[in-house]
Amino acid sequence: MDSNVFIFASLNNEELGNNARLILEAVQNRNVNAITSALTFDEIIWIIKKNRNFEDAISATELF
């Protein structure tokens, strides 16, 4: 799963963010199978840190 799904789910309150949260919910409920890599989480930290502060970046990744 691409880092954008996680990023939009945590930072976007519009339709794109809602769709990303629905995807993650489907994965969590085991309605959809998904895989990702450690690099994905590195990208998430980088993007959130770049746009916010480090504490927000850590908090956002704790959601997953």
Image (spheres, helix red, strand yellow):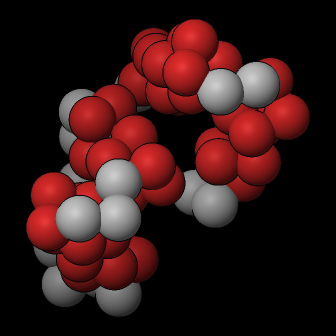
Q: Residue at x 55, y 21 (%)?
A: 51
Q: Where's residue 21, x and y in %?
A: 31, 70
Q: Where's residue 13, x and y in %?
A: 35, 64
The relative height of residue 12 versus residue 26 in the rendered view (above or below) is: above
Left or right position of 38 against 13? right
Is residue 35 at all visible to an observer of this figure? no
Q: Nearer the viewer, residue 40 or 45?
A: 45
Left or right position of 46 against 26? right
The relative height of residue 4 versus residue 44 in the rendered view (above or below) is: below
The relative height of residue 23 versus residue 41 in the rendered view (above or below) is: below
Q: Quadrant of residue 29?
A: bottom left
Is residue 30 at all visible to an observer of this figure? yes
Quadrant where the image shows the N terminus: top left
Q: Where's residue 61, x and y in %?
A: 64, 44
The relative height of residue 33 versus residue 35 in the rendered view (above or below) is: below
Q: Residue at x 80, y 24 (%)?
A: 54
